[in-house]
Amino acid sequence: MTKRNLLRHRRLPQLLVFSTIQPVMFLLLFTYVFGGAITTGAGKYINYLLPGILVQAVLFGAMQTGIGLMEDVSKGMIDRFRSLPMARSAILAGRTIADMLRNIFVIVLMTAVGYLLGFRIEHGFFNFLIAVGMMLTFGFAFSWVSATIGLAVKNPETAQVAGFIWVFPLAFASSIFVPVATMSKGIRVFAEYNPITYTVNTVRALALGLPVDNNIWFALIWIVAIMAIFVPLGINKYRKIT
């Protein structure tokens, strides 16, 4: 099932192309339009921004899981899979793993673009690989959230809207673009405990040689909690559909 979902990107390369255009646009716009007006205390704004954009790209990529699953439902593919001798969880696991592997390509591309814009890894390549692993695990967890939402709606269009409605507040009320200390009190409290903030802070610290502190542990706790809730929910929702 993982191979089947990966082959879709080879046969429909525009899916991969357009999934990378959006994060590149975010990176360019925030670097050259807003970067001069934002003070982060981390030197060049690109060094602060890129780790956040990488996490955002992985998160947005995870939202494609629910859309893809609902497309399979609407086209009758799920009925065909049901006749095969496989575990029902394999459908969801194959899709989420494939989307995680696709995110590797997105991370590599975005890092290369960031390097051209002035981003530099300051704490060693090995630590950056740990950051990449954290991002992929984070995206994998949110793929299960997307899968659950996608299987709960009636068509791919609704799955796309339902997925991004809750992702955008989480993404923008976090430390992706600006330090949470600059936000108003109510938003700041939400942003401080946001799982995206913990993940971005961990990735940023590993990339720039800053203290990781407890961010990595809180990020892992969020990832485990999300998977503990949404893996069984997604499988249960799939069983009800089929």
Image: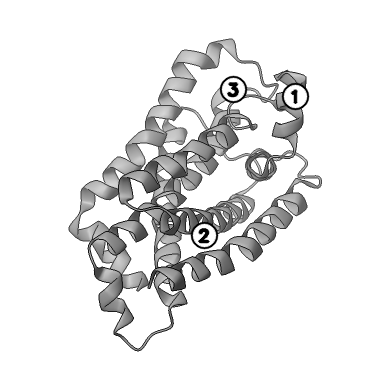
| Amino acid under disc 1 | Gly
Q: Quadrant of the C terminus?
A: bottom left
Precedes in sequence: disc 1 or disc 2: 2
Picture colour scheme: one colour
- Describe residue 98's horizontal placement relative to residue 210 as left or right: left
State the residue position of label 3: 44
The structure residue drawn at horizontal position 40% and vertical position 40%, both measured from the top left corner, is 161
Precedes in sequence: disc 3 or disc 2: 3
Precedes in sequence: disc 3 or disc 1: 3
Q: Position of residue 236 (x, y in %)?
A: 52, 70
Q: How far, Cα to Cα, is label 3 from label 2?
A: 35 Å
Q: Secondary structure at mark 3?
A: loop
Q: Position of residue 20 (x, y in %)?
A: 35, 41
Whether tag 3 and tag 1 are in contact, CB under 8 A, the answer is no
**Quarter assignment of residue 52:** top right
| Amino acid under disc 3 | Lys
State the residue position of label 2: 144
Q: How far, Cα to Cα, is label 1 from label 2?
A: 29 Å
Q: Secondary structure at mark 1?
A: helix
| Amino acid under disc 2 | Trp
Residue 142 or residue 10, whichever sits in front? 142
Q: Position of residue 120 (x, y in %)?
A: 55, 35
Residue 21, relative to residue 9: is it above or below?
A: above
Q: In the orientation shown, which residue stands out farthest toward the bottom?
A: 85
State the residue position of label 1: 186
- Describe residue 210's horizontal placement relative to residue 99 as left or right: right
Q: In this rendering, does residue 158 appear at all? A: yes
Residue 241, relative to residue 212: is it above or below?
A: below
